[in-house]
Amino acid sequence: MAAYGDCSIGTLFEAIFTVFGNVVGLVFQLVLGFVGWLFRPVVRALRNGLGVDRPMTVPTGIKLRELPPDARDGILAALQTDKEAAAALPRGWRGFYSSISSDSEAIGDLPPGTEIRLIPEPGNSDREDAVRAEAELPDRSTLRIGHLRRGHELGRSIAHGRVHCWFASRRRTLRAEGWEAVFFVAVYDP
């Protein structure tokens, strides 16, 4: 009987130390994550100063991947008639719709099918994966629409010239003064 009592006390202490260890480990992980988040701008500035980060521009010698003219025309026709544009893409390309919140009223002046330039901003202090979207208006001025949402995973494809983007439509957001620009994005992904 004494051995049974010793075993249950040992099991109780083992359970207490396991729970305590898990709680301490979780708190330690949260503290390290917070410290890492706090010093992220400092680390990014050091990496930029040392030249460790590669710029996310199209490397020289890499030709932009062009869509065949009939595919481009099919996409423009689909966007202007509010049909599915991905059906016009050739083999090796994938397409999807994405949206960006924009406070600019000028996105209402963009006709569906307007080409959108996606410009990586590796020096953006707010986000590593920041990509700015802008369009050229008929009067040759540039309309800055906004930034792609986090987690878009298009940075590498943009840097290698494998992404084309067009304005599809706009819609109101829940905020009264806000708009959302809807884009059709085509990515060469064989």
Image (cartoon, rainbow, N blue to C red):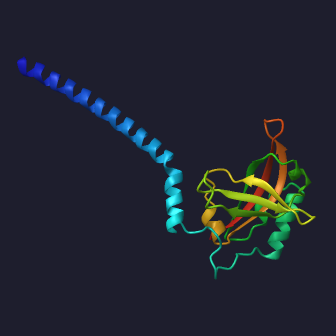
Observer able to see residue 151: yes
Residue at 62%, 63% (x, y): give it: 155
Determine the residue positioned at 78% across, 76% down: 68
Tell me: 138 left or right of 17: right
**Residue most extreme to the bottom:** 61
Q: Which of the 4 quarters of the picture holds residue 144?
A: bottom right
Residue 69 x %, y %:
82, 75
| Residue ID at (46%, 47%) | 36
Residue 87 lies, in percent from the top left, at: 77, 62
Percent of width and height locating residue 148: 69, 54
- The picture quadrant where one finds residue 189 is bottom right
Can you name the residue that lies furthest to the left here? 2
Task: Write down the quadrant of residue 76 in the picture.
Answer: bottom right
| Left or right of residue 88, residue 58 in this image | left
Q: Where is the N terminus found, in terms of image quarters?
A: top left
Looking at the picture, tell me which residue is in the foreground, 26 or 167: 26
> Foreground residue, 82 or 46?
46
In this rendering, is residue 73 above or below 14?
Answer: below
Residue 153 on image: x %, y %: 61, 58
Rendered residue at 83%/44% (across/down):
171
Q: Please state which of residues 40 and 97 is positioned toward the viewer in this rendering.
A: 40
In the depicted structure, whether residue 123 falls above or below residue 126 = below
Q: Is residue 133 above or below residue 29?
A: below
Q: Is residue 182 left or right of residue 4?
A: right
* Quadrant of the snapshot with the C terminus: bottom right
Single out the residue that lies furthest toward the right: 139
- Most extreme residue toward the top is 1
The answer to whether one can see residue 52 in this image is: no
**In the image: residue 144, left or right of residue 64:** right
